[in-house]
Each structure stands twice: as structure tokens, then as C-alpha cells.
């Protein structure tokens, strides 16, 4: 993707929850041509009053935004930021078709490591990047997001590791508003390193119902975090993804720096009776490990323990 300096990147944000809304808001701040694709009350609030984002220092910013409720109103764009939940990716992929041109790329911001493959099943690899982000934020209501902590970070890149300049204008857009944005040399390694973080923390926090400060300070639950990370690293290695030697200790250090009261999105969804990303987190570790003959007993235990609540949230069992 090449462009003259004065021409902005045309970006569609699909899934205007906490993550999609936050990073889309920053791109609006950067002066990029951003359209939000939303539905229901989210669409109505965004159209009438704009997007409100509260920051860790207590300030809030309201931005008038361009919003549609049908992707066909947009036509092809340069970039799609996909902020839906991991379990919504297959259906979202089909809905993205009107936004996809010959050189469009989709950046999935879902937790886990499977979203690019789900997207490529529908859109083909030419139109799919790998992607990830780090941030503590949540949706307070339609069109209203709170950034609760953690320096925002986003990374994306070609899944086949080929050198490409297509992502450079998007990176530059984020850097204009001081969002740390990187194009790693191997996006799959970066995604699995993020998986160490979110897979371990989400699983332990969801099963204990405890915030980060408690999970990391109780010796038994801290040991659970480390054991889940070891299982994830073993599955990654068996699947040809080599993480850096100190990846686990570095990930624990990241968890140690989080706000003590922080919770994960999977944890909140399970506690509030909503469908969650359980299958894309601990369920995926167990499933992907089984595919390559690597056991993941703790991930399997957490997945099995939380599965009844997940099935209840989806209306598949009642109790």
C-alpha cells in the first residue's frame, strides 16, 4: 500500500467494543479517514453523540465519528481493524467482504492465535495480517469506553513473515498520536508471546474470580500462571513457533506491572454470564496441543471447569 504523504489511510473499524473503539478513536485523533461499523444501540449512540473515551488520568474525550451500520455503505478500504470477540470471527469474516479490495488487509485484534487462520478461510491470505494489542480497557456502555491502564500497544504484520511495506502507513498513523505500534519480524511469534500473557491470566482470573493483584500475589495462583505459560510455550514449539528463552519471566513481569484491580475481558464475560473467549484461550491450548501430541493438563482443567458456564451463557444448557 503506497500513498502520497497528504493522503490518509482509509480504515474501517468493525467491532466497536473496548479494543476496537479505543484504537479507532486514536486513529481519528491522528486525522485518518476512519469509519466505524456498528449496530444496535452502539450505532445509535455513535451516530448521535460520538465516541467517548475515559483515560487513566480521569479525563474524557468525545469525538464525532463517521459510523455506518452496513459495510456496503463503505466500499473497499485500505485497512480493517477487527475488534469483535474471537468466537465471532468466522461470521464477521463473511460480513467484511464489501470492505475488501485487492490490497486491503484485515488486522485481527482478538485474543488467541487462531483469528488470522479463520479470516483466511474466507478472505484468503492476501487480505489477512496477524495482529495483537496490549491494553486494559472496557466498554462502559454504547459508545463509551474506559482506558483503565497499561500503555497501549499494537502490532501487526504479514503472517508468512515476508517483508512488506503495506503496514507501514498504519504504523505511522498510530505513532503520530504516541501509540506504540510495531511490525515485528515474525508476527506469529509475537502473537504466541501475547498468548502466554492473556491465556494464563484470563484462565486463572476467570476460575478464581480474583483481580490481577490477587492472582499474581498468592503463591499457588502465581504458580498456576507459570504452569499455563509453560504449556503454551510447549505447544508453540511443537507447532514450529520458537519463543525467546525468557518469554515466561518477561510475561510475568508484565503481569506484575498491571493495575492491581485489573480484570480480563474473558473473566468479566464469564462472571457476568455472557459468551466468552474461553474456547480461544485455554480451550485452544488444549485443542492445538492435542493436534501435535503435547498435553496441556492445566489448560484442559480450566477449560473443562468453566465450560458449563460457557454453555449456559450460550443457551446450550440450563441450570
Image: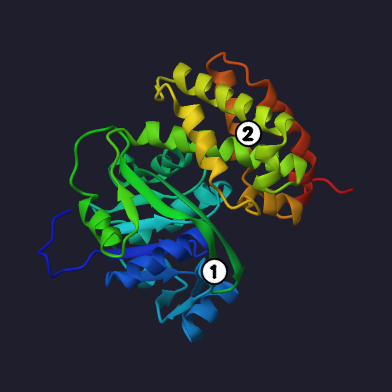
Disc 2 secondary structure class: helix
Does residue 237 show up? yes
Where in the figure is residue 314, as x and y percent of width and height? 73, 50
Q: Which residue is mark 1?
A: 145
Judge whether residue 14 can be spotted in this image. no
Q: Residue furthest bottom?
A: 48
Residue 43 vertical position relative to residue 256 in the rendered view, above or below: below
* Image: 170 above or below 65: above
Q: Position of residue 107 (x, y in %)?
A: 37, 50
* Circle 1 Cα neighbour tier, 10 Å, few/some/many (<14 / 14–19 / ≥20): many
Q: Which mark is residue 282?
A: 2
- As rendered, which of 208 and 187 lies closer to the eye? 208
Of circles 1 and 2, the one toward us is 1
- At horizontal 73% and vertical 29% (from top left) the residue drawn is 220
Q: Residue at x 45, y 28 (%)?
A: 247
Q: Earlier in the sequence, mark 1 or mark 2?
A: 1
The secondary structure type at the circle numbered 1 is strand
**Which residue is at the far left?**
4
Amino acid at each position: 500500500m503506497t500513498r502520497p504523504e497528504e493522503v490518509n489511510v482509509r480504515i474501517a473499524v468493525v467491532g466497536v467494543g473496548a479494543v476496537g473503539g479505543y484504537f479507532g478513536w486514536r486513529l481519528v485523533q491522528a486525522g485518518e479517514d476512519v469509519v466505524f461499523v456498528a449496530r444496535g444501540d452502539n450505532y445509535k449512540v455513535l451516530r448521535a453523540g460520538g465516541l467517548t473515551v475515559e483515560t487513566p488520568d480521569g479525563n474524557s474525550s468525545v469525538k464525532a465519528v463517521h459510523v455506518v451500520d452496513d459495510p456496503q455503505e463503505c466500499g473497499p478500504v485500505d485497512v480493517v481493524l477487527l475488534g469483535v470477540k474471537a468466537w465471532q470471527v468466522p461470521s464477521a469474516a463473511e460480513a467484511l467482504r464489501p470492505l475488501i479490495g485487492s490490497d486491503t488487509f484485515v488486522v485481527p485484534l482478538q485474543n488467541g492465535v487462531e483469528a488470522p487462520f479463520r479470516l483466511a478461510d474466507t478472505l484468503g491470505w492476501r487480505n489477512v495480517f496477524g495482529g495483537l494489542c496490549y491494553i486494559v480497557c472496557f466498554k462502559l456502555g454504547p459508545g463509551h469506553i474506559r482506558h483503565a491502564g497499561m500503555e497501549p500497544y499494537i502490532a501487526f504484520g504479514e503472517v508468512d513473515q515476508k517483508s512488506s511495506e503495506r503496514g507501514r502507513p498504519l504504523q505511522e498513523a498510530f505513532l503520530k498520536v504516541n501509540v506504540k505500534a510495531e511490525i515485528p519480524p515474525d508476527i506469529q511469534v509475537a502473537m504466541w508471546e501475547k498468548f502466554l500473557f492473556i491465556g494464563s491470566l484470563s484462565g486463572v482470573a476467570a476460575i478464581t474470580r480474583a483481580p490481577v493483584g490477587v492472582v499474581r500475589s498468592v503463591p499457588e495462583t502465581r504458580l498456576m500462571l507459570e504452569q499455563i505459560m509453560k504449556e503454551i510455550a510447549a505447544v508453540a514449539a511443537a507447532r514450529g513457533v520458537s519463543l525467546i528463552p525468557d518469554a515466561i519471566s518477561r510475561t510475568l513481569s508484565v503481569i506484575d506491572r498491571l493495575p492491581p484491580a485489573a480484570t480480563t475481558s474473558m473473566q468479566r464475560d464469564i462472571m457476568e454470564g455472557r459468551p466468552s473467549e474461553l474456547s480461544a484461550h485455554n480451550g485452544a491450548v488444549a485443542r492445538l496441543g492435542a493436534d501435535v501430541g503435547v498435553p496441556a493438563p492445566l489448560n484442559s482443567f480450566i477449560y473443562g471447569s468453566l465450560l458449563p458456564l460457557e454453555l449456559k451463557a450460550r443457551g446450550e444448557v440450563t441450570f
